[in-house]
Image (cartoon, rainbow, N blue to C red):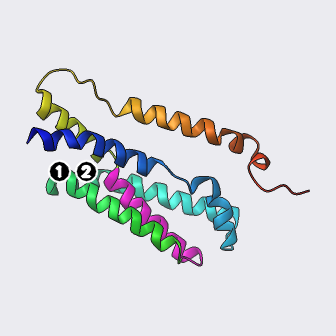
Amino acid sequence: MREKLHRNIPAIYGLAFSHSFMVIVPVIVPFFMSKGLSLADIFYLQAIYAATIVLLEAPSGYFADLFGRRTALLIGSVGHGLAYFYLNFAIDLNSLIVFEIGAGVAASLLSEADLAVLYDTQKALQGNQSSEHSKGRPTWVLSEAAQKIWEPCWEVPWRCGPSKS
């Protein structure tokens, strides 16, 4: 039993990294523009995504409590993958709205469920002792490293894109 619990820790770190490693973020606006969307449409899509997460945050937590955190993580991960697979076939604003809602539902299921599994695992392994593991530090280090890599692209977009001359 303890061996299975010990496997949860690197699995949760891997899951958190894979969901935080958003390679599409630097190219999402040009991708949406290639589908014929205006900047206003893109902001609208992002608002739909954010609203979906906000509206489903509490119900997804209830779902995780009712059916189990592992089930919520599994459904959220599969849903996340399916949403991004569907993105390949989205051709207009309506199909991109479906993508954003699907990705938002998946994100709300994944939201904090990984942290809850990590907390439950550490509690079961160590009882009331303080923990040396924390999700925050490794995730922070990875996000800081990714930010430093992409920072030149955010500050001066033409550094990372094709030259216009």
Q: Quadrant of the N terminus?
A: top left
User: Which residue is more in the foreground, 93 or 154?
Assistant: 154
SS of the residue under disc 1: helix
Whether residue 154 is situated above or below residue 161 in the rendered picture: above
Residue type at mark 1? Asp
Q: Quadrant of residue 138?
A: top left
User: Which residue is more in the foreground, 105 or 80?
Assistant: 80
- For label 2, the crowd category at 10 Å Cα-Cα, with few meaning under 14, some 14 to 19 and many 20 or more, is many
Magenta span contains residue 44: no
The answer to whether residue 114 is visible is yes
Whether residue 41 is situated above or below residue 47 in the rendered picture: below
Q: Which residue is mark 2?
A: 61
**CB atoms at circles 1 and 2 under 8 Å apart?**
yes
Q: Which residue is mark 1?
A: 65
| Residue farthest along the right direction in this orientation | 165
The answer to whether residue 98 is visible is no
Residue at position x 40%, y 55% in the image: 53
The percent coordinates of residue 155 (x first, y second) are 73, 40
Q: Quadrant of residue 101?
A: bottom left
- For label 1, the crowd category at 10 Å Cα-Cα, with few meaning under 14, some 14 to 19 and many 20 or more, is some
Q: Where does the magenta region start and end?
A: 90-110
Whether residue 112 is situated above or below residue 31 in the rendered picture: above
Magenta span contains residue 95: yes
SS of the residue under disc 2: helix
| Residue farthest along the front direction in this orientation | 3
Q: Quadrant of the C terminus?
A: bottom right
